[in-house]
Image (cartoon, grey):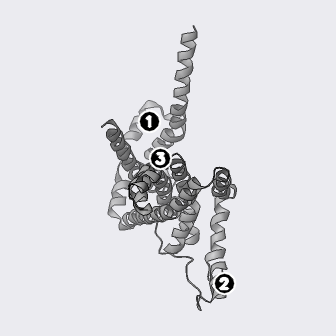
Amino acid sequence: MRKFAAAMGSRLVIAIPYLWLLALFLVPFFIVLKISLSQTAIAMPPYLPVFGLEQGVSGFLQGLREFSFDNYLWLLGDPIYIKAYLSSLFIAAVSTVLTLLVGYPIAYGMARAPTAVRPLLLMAVILPFWTSFLIRVYAWIGILKPEGLLNQFLFFLGVIDQPLVILNTTTAVYVGIVYSYLPFMVLPLYATLEKMDYALIEAAEDLGCTPLSAFWKITFPLSFPGVIAGSMLVFIPAVGEFVIPDLLGGSETLMIGKTLWDEFFTNRDWPVSSAVAIVLLLILVLPIVYFQRAQARAREQ
């Protein structure tokens, strides 16, 4: 009886995350997929077919026959959507590299700091999460606008004689993404660097390596899992980012998040917007799955 209870308990523990994924990922995914295969209609909801329990099995099968891939063909034939996807991927990739360049020295300094100071530094990295994401992005408007704090400070130092135009440009989007997602890069890097055995660095220097050479040959390769984890945590949400390009970017800043918003709320075209979301999900998920399988094969070798 105890063995049966223990087996049931272990299965329940394993089943909980699968049920969580089923309820919060798979079910919404199939709902969005179904809408993306539907046709736009002037109705509520604004798409056809709509499955209802009152229609029975025959109505369900009839609705399946009305599905089509016209919305996906529309995306492939419209250069605006292709440009939005490519622009989003480019902006997210550049932002990820910038975040890595800023976050790596921070994480390295935290990992090499005295043990008593590390909790305070970790708290300083997490502290921005105590403030609303929207408020933090709005704050950058006051900093980056022509009469904002940044230009006033540069005027005070005598560095510029004309205000810098940063707000409503792609540069402002980069600044907003790097600032907002910097903790997601720092925390995985810190977790990896903190566990590293720094005796290896001392041994490399004793064997003639310069500090820079020891960093590239030992520290960076050992921290590579943290680099990958942090880059994924920054790149994936940055591709679909809407708030930052909407508030800090200009009319020329084209990202798929803004395009998805316009299709859904302005044009009221739910099927096309759902198709945009499905394609974005596939763009992000497929490379991640491929990378995980490649890592698994490498570990087996």
Nearest to N terminus: mark 1 or mark 2: 1
Q: Residue at image x 50%, y 48%?
A: 192
Task: Name the quadrant of the N terminus.
Answer: top right
Percent across and percent down for residue 52 are: 51, 37
Task: Residue under label 3, please give it.
Answer: 32
- In the rendered image of this protein, does residue 148 appear above or below residue 87? below
| Rendered image quadrant of residue 208 | bottom left
* Nearest the eye: 183 or 243: 183
Task: Residue under label 1, please give it.
Answer: 59
Kindly report the distance in space between the C-alpha atoms of the residues bearing marks 1 and 2: 66 Å
Instruction: Tell me whether the residue at label 1 lies in contact with that at label 3, contact meaning CB atoms closer than 8 angstroms.
Output: no
Lateral position of residue 270 relative to residue 123, left or right: left
Instruction: Tell me whether the residue at label 2 lies in contact with that at label 3, contact meaning CB atoms closer than 8 angstroms.
Output: no
Task: Name the quadrant of the C terminus.
Answer: top left
Kindly report the distance in space between the C-alpha atoms of the residues bearing marks 1 and 3: 20 Å
Lateral position of residue 298 relative to residue 261, left or right: left
Task: Residue under label 2, please give it.
Answer: 152
